[in-house]
Image (cartoon, coloured by chain):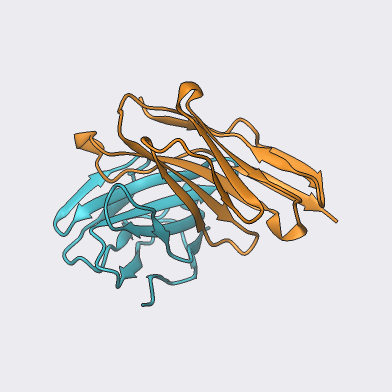
Amino acid sequence: NAGVTQTPKFQVLKTGQSMTLQCAQDMNHEYMSWYRQDPGMGLRLIHYSVGAGITDQGEVPNGYNVSRSTTEDFPLRLLSAAPSQTSVYFCASRIDRTYEQYFGPGTRLTVT
Amino acid sequence: AQKVTQAQTEISVVEKEDVTLDCVYETRDTTYYLFWYKQPPSGELVFLIRRNSFDEQNEISGRYSWNFQKSTSSFNFTITASQVVDSAVYFCALSEAWRGSTLGRLYFGRGTQLTVWP
């Protein structure tokens, strides 16, 4: 099993550009989430999904879109990048709400 | 409201000292799960332990031990005889079993930066 994979590992965007952060897992987990991590703020939930076709907003959803068309994939779309979205982004998956979450390696995004 | 508080932002110790990382949580549910994660300087997030609300037994794994006390809503983490490799950010997290609109959410504390000096 590859676990949770994320691409790219690093990305630099200009303000106003859009892009998609990819996340995939091969563990057949129903639950997937996106977090951003900023210094002193810990992990903040952006969006999450409890199964294919079902998504919901977390604490900081503005400026981001998600969709979940398959169990394996949970892409995060930045619609119009802003410098405030400079952060490290983590994707995670878990079997269900009672189990631990497995994290991807993260994507370091810089918006100039 | 659900909340996880890690009041210690940073802790510094010298190698071989014991250190305890505090975690206090709030929840209205009777069924919930608590977790600890480690984030070393390399950046990945590593799962350490999962504990459900019905199991208050302390757990020990090598130099690591966890003390779960429902009476004080705490789930503290102790590292015995700390080592430089223990230097990392440690996160405590809470997951509820029955809160319908937020099923699947894991609530994280802000983390404690532990630095172990040689």
Q: How many marks?
A: 0
**Which image quadrant: the N terminus of chain B?**
top left
Closer-to-camera residue (A88/B35): B35
Compared with B1, A61 (above or below) is below
Left or right: residue B17 compared with residue A97: right
Between A1 and A76, the one nearer to me in the picture: A1
Work out whether B102 lies above or below A54: above
Q: Residue furthest front?
A: B57
Residue, far bottom? A1
Residue sitting at x 43%, y 60%: A103
Q: Is residue B56 left or right of residue A76?
A: right
**Residue A83 x %, y %:** 50, 51
Is residue A84 shown above or below B22? below
Picture colour for chain B: orange
| B117 vs A103: above or below | above
* Residue ID at (47%, 61%): A14
User: B46 or A13, which is in the foreground?
Assistant: B46
The hue used for chain A is cyan
In percent of width and height, residue B48 lies at: 52, 54
Q: Where in the figure is residue B85, as x and y percent of width and height?
A: 71, 60
Q: Quadrant of the C terminus of chain B?
A: bottom right
Of residues B19 and A23, the one nearer the viewer is: B19
Q: Position of residue B15 (x, y in %)?
A: 82, 52
**Residue at image coords 38%, 45%:** A45
